[in-house]
Structure formats: structure tokens, C-alpha cells
Image: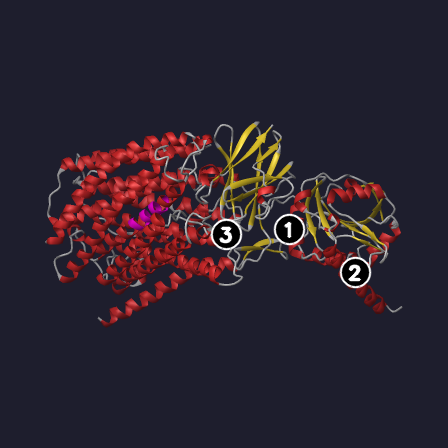
Amino acid sequence: MASVASTVTVPAADVYRTRLIRVTLVWVLTALVLFPVLAILGLLMRAQQGGYLQSTPPEVFYAIMTLHGLGMVGLWFVAGMAVISVLLANYVKPTTAVSWIAYGATLAGVVLLLAATLIGRLGVGWYFLYPLPFHSGGTWPPWATASLFAALAIMGVGWTVWSADLLFAIARRYRLSHALGWHYLSGATTPDVPPIIIISTVSFIGVLAGLVAAVVILVLVALEQFGSGFTNDALLIKNLTFYFGHMVVNITMYFGVAMVYEVLPAYTGRPWKTNTLVVLAWNLVLFLVMFAYLHHLYMDFAQPRWLQVTGQLSSYLISVPAAVVTIFSTLVLIYGSTMRWRLPSVMLFLGVMGWAIGGVAAVIDSTVAVNTRFHNTLWVPAHFHTYFVMGVMLMILGTVFHLVTDLSKVPERSALTKTIVGTVGLGGYGFLLMFYLAGVASVPRRYAVYPAEVAVGTTFAKVSLIFIAVLLVGALVYIWETGRRCLKAFSS
Amino acid sequence: MPITAFVVFVISSAIILLVFGVVARSTNAHRDVNYARANRLRLLFFVSLGAILLIFLALTLPDLPYPVEASAPERIVLATGKQYAWSLTEGTSPTLDNWDTAFSPTINVPTGAVVEFRVTTLDVNHGFSLYGPDGHLKAQTQAMPGYVNRLRVVFDQPGTYTVLCLEFCGMAHHRMRGVVEVR
Amino acid sequence: MPQSLFIVKRMAALLVAACAITSLRAQSADPRDAPPNEERLLNTTVPDIPLTTVSGARATLSQIAHGRPLLLAFVFTRCSGVCSPFLTSWRSADRAIAHGRYLRLALSFDPRDTSTDMFTLARHHALDDNDDWTFAVGDPSDVRRLADATGFWWAWDETRQQFDHPAMLAGIRDGRLVRLLVGGSITSARLDELVREVSGEFVRSYPLPGRVSFRCVRYDPATGRTTLDWGFALLLIPIAATGIGTLVMFAAGARVRGKE
């Protein structure tokens, strides 16, 4: 896999590849349908916060918030998994059947979640802190809580099997030390392990650890609900919850980054190979990502002080490999190159930039002294929407467009590219700016309505609607262009 | 201090935008990569970033909101959260049984007093937060079932301070409020 | 009377008294029967009353404390009830924990007690020659004021010719009541928390009493530090399980590779 061209060749037509591409296209089409729906739910939320939709009861807001959060986190995770698996097929052999199993499990989970939130009005949020699902205060019926946990369990099983299959696919070809690139540290360059393998190995280990944490939570919750006398420590469950949640979203981010490593070289005409720095960076990330979640618990004074300090140290430190290796190398890869600026490469480029900006906001908030003023204000959604909307979403969708354009052979039209990039860029950053400003103004997050003390939140929400509308225009153009390429690829 | 953090963020973002813009424009004129120079630049970036992070660690780690030693406070306020109200009392805190008669959403404290809030909850996680008369967040801590968190605050400015809930707790999360009158 | 018989009789009397006190509490609706409430009394100012120590010296509470925080217990020497076991358990718990600079004060509320009586009590507990412990008496009205400020009460029982009273330890710092430990038996864990509080160490969070199955952290009274509990082990399961799983997976992969 030495030449640039072969690292990004769309898999050649053969039965296995056809099957894999087919299931991936199904995933992509599903994502293209779900994404605008979930985005519009977000729009409705901001609209209510902006003082419109006043007749909507707050429990409906919170049910929508739950669906939007769980949906988006889940959506980008599975989209990342699907795209990664088709890129990995250049080197290893993921099992198509497992992808279908995961698809079925995800669909079942989505249906259960839709029922729980839209019909049952379950409003616990993504993330949710135990014991909230069991204290509805009459808002949602017990079946909605059961539905939530059933959905999480089914999707969890599906995603665990999927992650394990992908990791095993890597394991069938590489031994562990090679998959993590340790041989590069002693100067060896064979076997040549592409960055996507190293990043994927780190990612799947991480996601499996997160999923195990979710299993532990489910067991503990079940023990308390069905056992007699077993009482859970709220602090323990909180630690496990944030461990799981932080891991899932971080790994989603890494999937996007892996796509950048794999796909961008084709557009720059320069290779991006594994070297000592890449290995050091990603092995350090594997270690640090296990502790960074602690930055969610700074305001829990019951946590031991040394854990709080560990949280800040690991959160600060984890920015170094990202910035010094990946982001810097992205820029070196592009600088002065014969870069073909097409929609995929523009989106990947902007995605890395968004990741950098979101990262700065994240490191700032992971400072304990700052966190006392920013924790659970809108600064938090500001930074994670930066990571997601202007980071990983652009990376994944850029890669998707690259894949479906190659498969469908439908050429790109630069006018549409400019439209998409312009609207998404302007709309996206404008919408985010409203979150950041509101966070600085101490406006709380997860409020259906802003009280008088933080009335400025209503104004920020109103303004953000304009930007969301602009963003949605770009998103819809993208969805249309990608969707028709998908369908064409299907038929061919 | 949120303003300071925001300024740092804006400056950093501007630098990022600038750098990415320069790199994007550079593709108009092709040149080969001078890897030696690139790696020197990378080393410089690494050292600078490391230095910046270390400086911020040194500046901020001593400022943790977890005091190790403290003299006796002038007032101890028991802050109890419940779906969907805050109770601020001295002496006794309400329980689920006597909530309606025993809870009080307001409390008065003198200006300049060191007040210690003992924060807990009777049901789910809540977030105890104090908003000043200027609408800015002054201090916060989590209200966790089974724990009491102690938050020390000095109210330098007189006025009406609001307690808002800062951890999502259900359908009236946004309506939970308490009032601390500082005179 | 042989020493052992004396002790047995005292223990029997204690048991009877305990039962009597318990039954009295159950029957009576007298507010004095309710245990002192820490919450209600938190941060109240404690009067700086004059006392007479076992050596006959006269000084105020703050002078005896020498600026140290203090733990205060009310006792009386003719007590056939909880006072002696209470003092014993306090002394044992005190030995078990990490020491801070504070004064332990046992004060009699019985007007009949003299400093000589208190000296006898101190010697009985082998605390007469210990600078950290002080046994003292005071003027009845002063002692009453101090008792009221800390929630301590007593009532004379004609039948048994004994005082009814609660057993408690008051933590006093800078002239204010900081914590109250109520109960006849002092465990080292509870004492440790109280001592830390009284010594000015800011305990920024503490768990409420209640059965919790797996905690993350707990106090270790022997070392005086917070240590990790079984709950923390649960937190390590994800990393451990995934680590093992990854090794197993790659071993299996190697085997598959070997076969191909």
C-alpha cells in the first residue's frame, strides 16, 4: 500500500467489496435521512429557547432534547463506523453480516427511542444521570424508561459486536504491537502499517472500554431496581456514565480524523505515512483518553482532589498529540501542494480546523478554575457542537462525498460546492458563536425557557435561528447531491 | 474571568483561522515540502504549546475551588434540591415528608459574610448555582443524592442573588429557583 | 468487694439504665428526649465560661484550650450509665486516629462534683497525666449556659437517683459549635471526621449516612486519609476487561493468520 493512489482507491468490484459497499450505502442513506430530522429537532429547541413555540410544554422540549442528543451522538458514531469499515477494507476484511446486525440493532434502538421520547415524552437528556430515568415526576410512564434502557442495550450489543469484528479484522492481519505501530519506535518500517490502522486500533479499544462501562452501569441499575437492598453510589454511576459518554464522542472524533489521514493524501498528491510521531501520538492518546473524562466531574466536590487534577492534566496533555502531530501534519501535507480543492478535501480541511477551534474551547473549559464559571452553561454545547458540526461531521460527510462520487462517477459542480461550503461555514460558525457568547454570559444549558436573570439567552437563541437556517440550506443541498450519488451507486 | 477565557478563545481561534488561511492560499504556488524545515517548525510549535499549557497549569491549578483549610464560616445555609424547588434554610433542612411546611426558597445573609452552603438533594442530581445581581454565575457545585457538598462563598456586593439549577433534572428544571438576599 | 464483682455490678446497672433510658425515650414525648440536633445548632456561638480543672486551677474555656480547637463531653462522676463506657470508647477511638492539635475536655454538669471527683474519674481512665485531656468542673449556671448552647440536657431521675442525659461530643472551634457527634459509642471513623472538621480542615464533601452498596471512596481512620473503595474497582473494570479482551482477540487473530 505504498502509493498514494492505492490508499484511497475505492474498493474494486468483487463480491465481498460489493456487499460491503452495499451495506455502507444503506448506512449512508439512513444517516442522510436521520440527520436533517435530528437537526430540525435542534432547530425547534433553539426556537423554543428563543421565545417562539411558547405553547409547547417544557416536557416536550426535554423529550426532543433527549432524542436530538442521543440521536446525534448515535448517528455520527455509526456513520463513522460505517465509513471507517469501508476504508479499512483496503487493508483488512470486516464482516459484512456484522454490519447488517449492527444496522438492525441500531434501527431497533431508534424505533424504541422514538417511541420513548415522542410518544412517552421521556426527557432525561443525553447524557442522563442516574437516578433521573426513575424519577419522572409523572412526566413519562415507566414503559418509556424501559424502552430507553432496552434501546441502549440493543444498540450497545450491536455496536459491541461491530467494534469487536472490526478490531478482530485488524487482528487477523496484524499482531497487536504492529497494529499500534510500536515497531516504528525502534526504527523499523516494515510491516508498513497505515495510520488508519493505528488510529482504528486505538479507537476500537477505546470504544469497547466505553461500552463495557455502559454494561457495568446497566448491571448496577438492574441490581438496584430488581434486587432488594442494593443501593447505588450516585458518584460511582456518574463516573461510569461520563466515562462511557466521553469515550463514545471522542472515538467518533477519531474516526473522522482517521478519514482525514486516509483520504486527504489523494487530494494533495502527497502521501501520509506512519512514522514515529504518529505512533507516539496515537499511543499517548490511547492512554490519556481513559482519564480525560474526569473533567466532567470538577463540580462534584465528592471526587478526590487528585482525580480532579488528573482530569485537568490529561485533558491538557491530550491536546498535544492532536495539535503537534495530526493538525500540524495536515497543514504540512497541504502547504504548497497541488491540492485539488473539491468538496471532500475542503470539508476535510475545514473539519480539521473546526476540531482545532473546538479543542481550544474544550481545553479552556477543562481548566478547573474556569470550569466553576462555565460548567453546564452554554459554553459546553458550544464546544461540543464545534467538535461535531464543524469537526467530525465535516470529516465524515467529506469522506462520504468522496466515496459516493467515486462510486457513482457523477462529477462535482463547483457552484454547488461553493454553496455548500459557504452556507455550512457561515451558518455553522454563526450558530456556534451564539452558544459561545451565551456561555460567557452564564446562560445555563438544557433550559427550555430562560428566566429573567439570563434573559439574554433568549436573544442569542433567536439570532442562532438565522444561522441554523443558513446551515440547513447547505446541509440540504449536500444531502440532495450525496443522496442521488448514493442511489446511482446502488444501481451500478 | 469568563471574559478572559473568551478573549483567549477568540485570539486562539483567530490564529487558527489565520494559519489555515495561509496554508490554503499557499496551494496557489506549488513548492516541495522541506521536511527538515517543517520538523523544526513542528518542534518550535511543540515547545511553544507545551510552554503555554504549563503556564496555564501553573496559573490555574493553585486556584482550585476545593479549599483545604478554612476558618469557621459566619453562616451555614442548608441548600436542598428537589424536583422542582430549592430550599435554603438554617438549622434544619426539609425532608421529603415535611417539605411543604419546612422548606424555604429564600434566605437573608449579611454583606461580606463568609457563607457556607451545604448542598444536597432529596431525589435526583441537581446543580446548585449562585447568580449575582448582574446576572453572572458566581459559584456552583453539584447536588448529589447521598452526599453533602460544601460551597463557601463571600457575598461582597449586596443585592438579590438567585439560585438556579445547573444540572438537568426534569421537566421544570428551568423553573427551580432560590433567592439569597444579601444586605 | 472484689474489683471484678464491682465491674459486673456496674455493667448490670448500665444495662438496666440503658433499657430504662430507651423505654423512657419511647414513651415520653418530652422534647428533651430527642437527641441533640447538629443542624439546628451548627455555628452557634459557645459561651467562654470559667472552669476549675483537676489541679484546682481556674481558667476560661478558651484559656484552657490555648487557642486549640476542642472536643467537649459532659459527664458526671456518679454516673452508672453511659458516661464511663462513653469515655472509654472515646479514648480508644482517639488513639486509633491520626492526631491533630486539639484539647479533649470532659466537663461535669453535676453540682455535687468537685475537681477531686473529676481527678478520680480521670485517673480511672488513665487520663490524669495527659496534657491533651482536661477534666473540669464549673459553676452550675455557667455549665447550664454552655450545655444549652451545645444541645446537652439532663434531668434528675428520683427512682434511680441518677441523671438522664444524652451522650455526645461537641466540636468547638473559634468559639463556635462546628460538629456534634451524638451517641454512646464513638467509632474512630466518626471521630476522625469530627477531628478534621474541628482542626479547620475543610471537608468539602461528605456522604450522608445510609447504606450504599459500592462506594468510590471512604475515610480510613487509621491513616486519616481518603482511600479508594470497591466502587473504584468497578471503575477499573472497563479498562481491565478491554485490555484482556484485546490481548485475547489479537492472540486469536495470530492463530488465524498462522493457519492461512
Numbered label attached to residue A235: 3
Identify the subunit bearing mark 3.
A
Q: Residues within 10 Å of mark 2 (few under 14, many from 20)?
A: some
Q: Position of residue C88 (x, y in %)?
A: 75, 59
User: Looking at the rendering, in which quadrant would you find the N terminus of chain A?
Assistant: bottom left
The secondary structure making up most of the magenta span is helix
Q: Position of residue B165 (x, y in %)?
A: 48, 40
Q: Residues within 10 Å of mark 1 (few under 14, many from 20)?
A: many
Amino acid beneath label 2: Ala
Q: Secondary structure at mark 2?
A: helix
Numbered label attached to residue C17: 2
Q: Are tags 3 and 1 found on a single chain? A: no
Are discs 2 and 1 less than 8 Å apart at CB? no
Q: Is residue A302 left or right of residue A129?
A: right
Q: Position of residue C103 (x, y in %)?
A: 74, 47
A66 inside magenta stretch: yes
Residue for point 38% across, 64% down: C244
In this rendering, is residue C220 above or below B35? below
Amino acid beneath label 1: Glu
Of the image marks 2 and 1, the number of the one nearer the N terminus: 2
User: Looking at the rendering, in which quadrant would you find the C terminus of chain A?
Assistant: bottom left
Cα distance between the residues tagged 3 and 1: 20 Å
Residue for point 50% across, 41% down: B61
Q: Which segment is the magenta one?
A: A65-75
In this rendering, is residue C1 above or below A127? below
Residue holding disc 1: C193
Cα distance between the residues tagged 2 and 1: 30 Å
Cα distance between the residues tagged 2 and 3: 42 Å
Identify the subunit bearing mark 2.
C
* Residue placed most toward the observer, B139 or C144: C144
Would residue B49 be seen by someone viewing this image from the given angle? no
C135 inside magenta stretch: no
